């Protein structure tokens, strides 16, 4: 393992995935309206990445930043929609405020997804699901995976379908972590900047990859919608720039992404495509995993820890991200 990197969290993720639903969710019924997801930071990113789960359940879902909902209103949320408020700690002030706004507007089903049933978010929602991650501040992949699993299991419950086995996903995750180790060793110095590209749900993964690179590796990283990257942002490609491209699983988006990858390989800088084929060559893997957001993020987490070590600081030790700073709206 890369020095300073915790042991692979696959066993811990398996335990979280196989944990039972809260009793109140046993009789969960699908909404007559739509699914509305709200969150900040990683919770917002995982909400974007989880939207295919609800589509598989026959439900239309939308993800929105909690601050946008506060500033510009929640008029699009109908009383028969299911509002899902996502916050790992349960004390994101913006997300708690959205729950309170929705209650005042008469939205009947407001569900909190958090790791703390005693949190302000749990109190503000009509129901709450504890994802059951222990310890409270675990290795990064565990809390992100816990949120992703919670939304997947909720979608399965709403769609009255059986959750898939974790066995095959565990193998993909192990492979992704190994790939992260291999890639980390290929960097003698960290990249100066990172562009993370993804379409649709993969934009949530790309956004989370950029967040991890910033928080843990202190690399200047930015997420971009893949198609929009062609319209100007591509100009920053340089020898010390790294591009992370999350290749879409379905056509025609996949072919468009691979065409962009071919073009990027002709430009300065380094390109990594995900999901990887195990060698991160010029083609992306055709393997489609259910939790592609998690397997796509795993190599970046490992590399971010390694980049922090190369720069001589503790991975994930935040300098400026405090409650005083993150609470945009008091």
Image: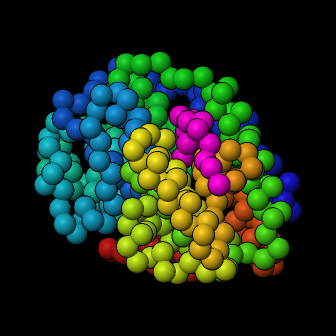
Q: Does residue 311 show up?
A: yes
Name the image quarter holding residue 321.
bottom right
Viewer-proximal residue, 217 or 73?
217
Horizontally, residue 151 falls left or right of residue 295, namely: left
The answer to whether residue 123 of the structure is visible from this angle is no
Position of residue 53 in the picture relative to residue 290 (left or right): left
Locate the C terminus by quadrant.
Answer: bottom left
Residue 307 placement (x, y as % from top left): 75, 71
Q: Residue at x 31, y 66 (%)?
A: 67
Drawn side of residue 318 relative to residue 79, left or right: right
The quarter of the displayed image where residue 44 is located: bottom left
Residue 312 inside the magenta-drawn segment: no
Where is residue 123 shown, x and y percent of the image?
36, 47
- The quarter in which the N terminus is drawn is bottom right
Relative height, residue 147 to residue 65 (above, below): above
* Residue name at image x 64 percent, y 74 percent: 269
Give the residue at x 44% y 40%: 250
Total marks in image = 0
Magenta stretch, main secondary structure, is loop
Placement of 225 over or under 33, stated as above or below: below
Residue 54 shown left or right of residue 138 in the figure: left
The magenta-colored residue range is 282-295
Would you place residue 88 above or below residue 190 in this image?
above
Residue 12 image offset from top left, x and y in percent: 70, 38
Residue 35, horizontal then vertical, whole percent: 28, 40
User: Which residue is depicted at the point 21% across and 51% down?
Assistant: 102
């Amino acid at each position: 393992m890369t020095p300073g990197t915790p042991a692979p969290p696959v066993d811990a993720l398996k335990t979280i995935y196989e944990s039972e639903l809260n009793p109140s969710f046993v009789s969960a019924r699908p909404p007559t309206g739509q699914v509305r997801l709200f969150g900040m930071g990683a919770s917002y990113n995982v909400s974007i990445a989880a939207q295919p789960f609800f589509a598989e359940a026959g439900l239309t879902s939308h993800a929105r930043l909690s601050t946008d909902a506060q500033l510009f209103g929640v008029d699009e949320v109908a009383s028969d929609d299911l509002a899902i408020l996502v916050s790992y700690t349960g004390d994101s002030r913006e997300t708690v405020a959205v729950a309170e706004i929705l209650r005042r507007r008469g939205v009947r089903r407001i569900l909190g997804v958090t790791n703390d049933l005693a949190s302000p978010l749990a109190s503000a929602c009509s129901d709450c699901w504890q994802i059951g991650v222990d310890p409270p501040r675990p290795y990064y992949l565990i809390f992100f995976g816990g949120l992703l699993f919670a939304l997947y299991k909720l979608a399965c419950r709403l769609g009255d379908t059986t959750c898939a086995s974790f066995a095959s996903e565990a193998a993909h995750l192990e492979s992704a972590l190994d790939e992260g180790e291999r890639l980390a060793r290929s960097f003698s110095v960290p990249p100066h900047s990172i562009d993370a590209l993804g379409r649709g749900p993969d934009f949530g993964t790309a956004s989370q990859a950029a967040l991890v690179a910033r928080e843990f590796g202190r690399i200047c990283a930015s997420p971009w919608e893949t198609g929009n990257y062609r319209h100007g942002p591509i100009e920053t490609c340089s020898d010390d720039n790294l591009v992370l491209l999350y290749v879409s699983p379905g056509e025609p988006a996949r072919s468009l992404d691979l065409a962009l990858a071919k073009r990027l390989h002709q430009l300065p800088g380094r390109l990594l495509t995900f999901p990887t084929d195990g060698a991160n060559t010029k083609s992306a893997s055709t393997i489609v995993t259910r939790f592609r957001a998690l397997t796509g993020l795993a190599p970046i987490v490992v590399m971010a820890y390694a980049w922090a070590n190369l720069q001589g600081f503790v991975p994930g030790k935040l300098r400026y991200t405090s409650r005083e700073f993150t609470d945009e709206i008091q």
